[in-house]
Image: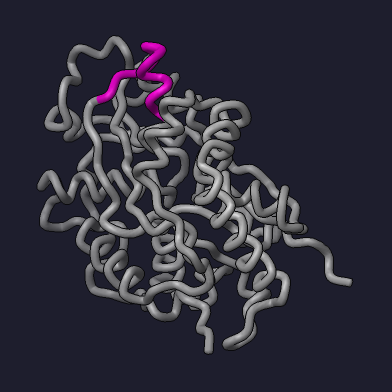
Amino acid sequence: MASPLKVGYVPEHFSTPLHFAKKYYGLEVELIPFPSGTGHMITALRGGEIDVGIGLTEGWVAGLGKSQEAGDQDGGYKLVGTYVETPLCWAISTGADRPEIQSVDSLQGRKIGVSRIGSGSYVMGYVLADQQGWLSVNKEQASPFSYTVVLNTFEHLRKAVNSGEADFFMWEHFTSKRYYDKGEIRRVGEIYTPWSSWKIVATTGLVDGDKLDPRVDDLLEKLNLGIKHFNDNQKEAVKFISTELDYSEEDARAWLDTVRFPERTEGVDPAVIIKTVEILRKAGVLAAAGGSDPNAMIAKRR
C-alpha cells in the first residue's frame, strides 16, 4: 500500500479548507507546515522531503522558469491544481520607529527583506519595482534595491526592519495586520498580485503523462470537499482561524470577504501561468528573452 503523501503548506488562514478536508472528509496525508513560505517548499520538493506543496503562484512559476532557463526542463515539480482564485494582498512593512521611511516612494534603493530567494516575498519586490518604474533598462544585472536580506521567517523579517538589518519587507495583509495593531511594525503600503494567488504542485514523480498518482487525485477531491465545507460553515471557519491560527475574529471575518476558493481544485488555467511568466519577465525575475515555457510547467490532463 502506498504511503500517505507529505503535503507542505503555509500555516496561515488560507490553510483552513485543508484542515477541514483532513478533519471531516478523510484526507489521509501528512501535513508539514512551512512558515517560511513557498521558496522553502520548492527546496523541500526537490530534496524529496515533501510530495505536494500548496503555495504562491509567483513562487512556483519563478522556480520552474529559472530551472528551464538553466536547461532543466523537469524542475522537480509540476503545477497540478488551483487553490485560491483571488489575488493576494501583500502589505509593505517597515519598523515601528523608522521615520525615514514614510511611503513606497522612499523604498527605492533600500534593503529589502525576503524569506528566501525565489519566494513570493522576493518575487513581489521586483513586481513592486516594475510598477514603480525603478527597474533599469538592463534589468537582469541591476537590482532596484541596495541589498536583498534573506531572513527565512516572518518573525525574523519583523525583527530585521526594527533593527535596521532590512528596511522593508512584504507579507500577506491579514498576517501582517495583527503586528500593526500591536505596534511592532508599521504599514507603508500594499500591492496585489496580478494573478490568482495560490496553486498546488506535485513532484514530477507523481505525474505520469496525462495521469496523476491516485493519491494526488484523492487529495484534490478531498480539498474540494474541504472548500465546500469552508464556504458552507463560515462561523466555524472564523472560529478555527481565530483560535487555531492566532488571528482576531474581526480580521478573520474581514478576510472571508476578500477570498474565493475554486469549486474544483483540479487543473490550472494556462492563461494564468502565461500571464504570470510575462509579468515576471517584465519585472526582471525571469529572463526577458524567454527560455521559460509556461505550458511545460503544468501537468497536462485529459
* Residue that appears at 30% across and 57% down: 285
Does the magenta segment cover residue 178? yes
Left or right of 28 in this view: 153: left
* Residue that appears at 57% across and 31% down: 239
Q: Quadrant of residue 49?
A: bottom right
| Percent of width and height locating residue 289 | 23, 73
Q: Nearer the viewer, residue 41 or 30?
A: 30
Q: Nearer the viewer, residue 224 or 28?
A: 224
| Any part of residue 35 in sight | no
Q: Quadrant of the N terminus?
A: bottom right
Q: Quadrant of residue 205?
A: bottom right
Left or right of 72 in this view: 272: left
Does the magenta segment cover residue 15? no
> Which span is picked out in magenta?
176-187
* Residue that appears at 35% across and 54% down: 86
- In the depicted structure, whether residue 57 falls above or below residue 192: below
| Percent of width and height locating residue 102 | 16, 20
Left or right of 160 in this view: 103: left
| Percent of width and height locating residue 177 | 38, 25
